[in-house]
Amino acid sequence: MKTRTLSSERSLNWTFALVFATTYIVLYVAYSLIPDSWLADFVYNIGIVGPAKVVVNGLAPTEHTVGVHNRLESARATLSIVRGCDGSGVIFLLIAAIVAYRSSWKRTLLGLLGAVMLISLLNLIRIVVLYFIQAYHAPWFESMHVYFIPTATILLGTLYFALWTARVA
């Protein structure tokens, strides 16, 4: 009896890993097929640059930021949003983990919706913070952009997944 339990647990672990990896790869490949120009003109301009411009100008009206395609610009700084700056990597990881975790379709959909909303909000905060760092503390930009903020986003995404699985279980 105990052997069956261990065997079924191993099978579930392999099933999770297989579904997780397959889902992530499918999302990544599909994302890679989207033309950069379409992302810049529509997704980044409307979904990231526009909201970031509103937040920056709301926090610091003297910045007078404008959105130009995939760029957030002012007299002090220019941030270009390119593939990968949209939070897609963390969103794909969370989607893959939530899909691979066995739950009801309703809880899975709510988990997916929450994950996309959370990472989108964190990414908006990330863009705004990076704008102010670029404008006022440029030497910090690279380490914050490449190391600190992505790590914090992944950790918060992991925390979301842990909390979601705890509620589902």
Image: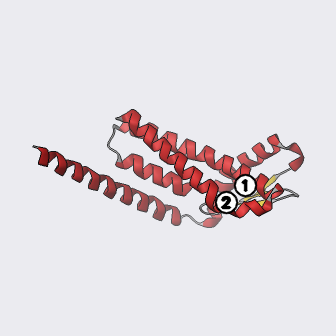
Q: Which residue is mark 1?
A: 130
Q: Secondary structure at mark 2?
A: helix
In whole angstroms, how far apart are the C-alphas of marks 2 and 1? 7 Å
- The one nearer the camera, 77 or 154, is 154
Q: Position of residue 56 (x, y in %)?
A: 79, 46
x 32%, y 52%: residue: 16
107 lies left or right of 71: left
Colouring method of the image: secondary structure
Amino acid identity at mark 1:
Leu
Is residue 88 visible in the rendered image? The answer is yes
Question: Disc 1 on helix, strand or loop?
Answer: helix
Q: Quadrant of residue 58?
A: top right
| Residue lying at 50% horizontally and 40% vertically, measured from the top left | 113
Mark 2 Cα shell of 10 Å, populated few (<14), some (14-19), many (≥20): some
> Residue at point 46% right, 49% down?
94
Residue 136, position in %: x, y? 83, 55
Quadrant in the rendering for residue 168: top left
Q: Is residue 102 left or right of residue 98?
A: left
Residue 85 visible somewhere in the drawing: no
Q: Nearer the viewer, residue 153 or 29?
A: 153
Q: Position of residue 1 (x, y in %)?
A: 9, 43
Asked if the residues shown at circle 2 and circle 1 are in contact, with their CB atoms under 8 angstroms apart, the answer is yes
In this rendering, the answer to whether 167 lies above or below 41 is: above
Q: Quadrant of residue 106?
A: top left
Identify the residue at the far left of this view: 1
Identify residue type, mark 2.
Answer: His
Q: Which mark is residue 145?
A: 2
Which tag, 2 or 1, sits closer to the chain's start? 1
Q: How many marks?
A: 2
Q: In what quadrant of the picture does the C terminus appear? A: top left
